[in-house]
Image (cartoon, coloured by chain):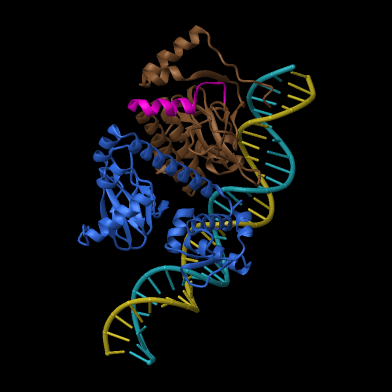
Chain colours: A brown, B blue, C yellow, D cyan
DNA sequence: CGCTTAATTGATCAGGGTCAATCGTGGTGG
DNA sequence: CCACCACGATTGACCCTGATCAATTAAGCG
């Protein structure tokens, strides 16, 4: 499994891009130097449940899924992380989640010790970390809310709306993940997700021009469902 | 609703108790002086969704529920907070959750501004806040996990185990909350919670000596269900 | 052009929601 | 002290949504 290693680039072009990107994200200067750029191909494992918590990551491009494997074989996807999201930061010694690249993606890998050390000296850094934690908390709570929604169609509608937010006002939304991913995120089966999407299409609320594309025709109707 | 005000005590006995309690919880000295003791009777509203985020709380005794009211009238309980838990700390200006006392409880109320100001100067305080955030995050994630469990009996079993943890090795567990609370926490109906408990009792896994008491007879079986 | 994997669709079944009746417990007042 | 009431909890009957099993279609890819 680790035979296929992630590529770690240090070419100047990449480093420049990183610095520019970081500056645009209001990242404290000390943090900008602390990380290391990593690229991962589709499906690559970034870390696994039970592993050590030495590192954590920030997504630059692409999508990452964090998940648990349950004893009955099911997979519960905790979150999809996209550009700007931080994931894999935990207090304990052991990871409670695994992480994989949903598609090709670029991340910055930080060493936890280094950052904690930085945070000791620099208030900007510790504030930044705190914001990250609170952001992840808010996300986890809204995920709980998703899972507590009764209807399958409602869950799918809520998911589509949430996912579409990162594309601003665009109506034609690319889906980075498979139906199975969506199902595992929503606590449904792949068939039910498919049926819900089909029904939304029949009702004219969305269109499915491509297998990994959704067009949001009636956002009000979606919001009404997601309520 | 606010006609029944929470009592705010400043008697020396209470203050002494507070200080002793805080010392036992490894709370940084600057934080110990910053809060104010509040007591709330059963069902009292502590804060409401949409309100301002000026304050947050730490539970000393009793149980608090944080929840959202959904558009369809349902109530989603996000968490039950018990002794030592911090709740109501949010980044945004508006609260995304409401909070109520499940039973009579005592809390410390902090002013967010004061604490953020303290955190600027004192690393211990900001570290403490960070830990709190990460702890709440872990809790929210384990709640997502609970909600993604398929069977009703499995959810109830997982809930009982999680709830029992705060009582150490004790087998006779008091339930502070009603069946409705449990149902709203697990995303089930009151009837299904009741049926699940009855079934667990029939199977000899638990006993229900009182309406608000559970005896855990076969913890291994529970763990097996919760898996 | 097959081969493989993902997605859709259909048919059937079971778990949990819903509605309704009953039970139990605790509190109040006669 | 007991009768009564109110509220929470339990139990039963029925139905509906989503899981399951199975077949078909569509989409990459060598």
Q: Nearer the viewer, residue B181 or D19?
A: B181
Q: Report if residue A118 lies within the magenta region.
A: yes
Instruction: State the image quarter where residue A195 is shown.
Output: top right
Q: Is residue A58 above or below residue A205?
A: above
Query: Which image quadrant: the N terminus of chain B?
Result: bottom left
> What residue appears at the point 41 percent right and 30 percent down from the top-left corner?
A165
Q: Nearer the viewer, residue C2 or B176?
A: B176
Instruction: State the image quarter where residue B131 is shown.
Output: top left
Q: Is residue A60 left or right of residue B114?
A: right
Q: Report if residue B6 lies within the magenta region.
A: no
> What residue appears at the point 35 percent right and 25 percent down from the top-left corner?
A122
Relative image position of residue B28 (x, y in whole percent): 33, 43
> What residue appears at the point 44 percent right and 43 percent down from the top-left corner?
B135
List the single residue furthest toward the top.
A12
Relative image position of residue B164 (x, y in whole percent): 51, 59
The mark tally for this picture is 0
Relative image position of residue B204 (x, y in whole percent): 62, 68
Q: Is residue A68 visible?
A: yes
Instruction: State the image quarter where residue A42 is shown.
Output: top right
Q: Is residue B1 visible?
A: no
Q: Is residue A42 left or right of residue C20?
A: right
Q: Is residue B109 above or below residue A37?
A: below
- State the extent of the magenta-drawn residues as a range: A103-124
Relative image position of residue D28 (x, y in whole percent): 65, 21
């Amino acid at each position: 499994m680790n035979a296929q290693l992630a590529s770690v680039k240090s070419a100047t072009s990449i480093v420049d891009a990183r610095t520019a990107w970081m500056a645009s994200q209001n990242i404290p200067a000390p943090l900008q130097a602390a990380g290391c750029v990593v690229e991962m191909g589709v499906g690559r494992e970034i870390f696994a449940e039970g592993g050590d918590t030495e590192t954590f990551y920030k997504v630059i491009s692409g999508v990452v899924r964090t998940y648990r494997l349950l004893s009955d074989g099911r997979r519960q996807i905790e979150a999809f992380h996209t550009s700007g999201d931080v994931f894999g930061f935990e207090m304990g010694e052991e990871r409670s989640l695994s992480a994989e690249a949903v598609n090709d993606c670029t991340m910055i890998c930080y060493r936890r010790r280094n950052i904690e050390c930085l945070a000791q000296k620099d208030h900007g850094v510790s504030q930044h970390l705190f914001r990250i934690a609170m952001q992840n908390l808010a996300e986890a709570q809204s995920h709980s809310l998703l899972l507590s929604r009764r209807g399958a169609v409602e869950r799918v509608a809520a998911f589509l709306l949430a996912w579409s937010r990162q594309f601003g006002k665009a109506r034609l939304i690319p889906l980075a993940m498979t139906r199975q991913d969506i199902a595992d995120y929503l606590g449904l089966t792949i068939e039910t997700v498919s049926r819900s999407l089909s029904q939304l299409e029949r009702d004219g609320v969305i269109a499915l021009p491509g297998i990994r594309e959704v067009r949001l025709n009636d956002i009000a109707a979606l919001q009404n469902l997601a309520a």
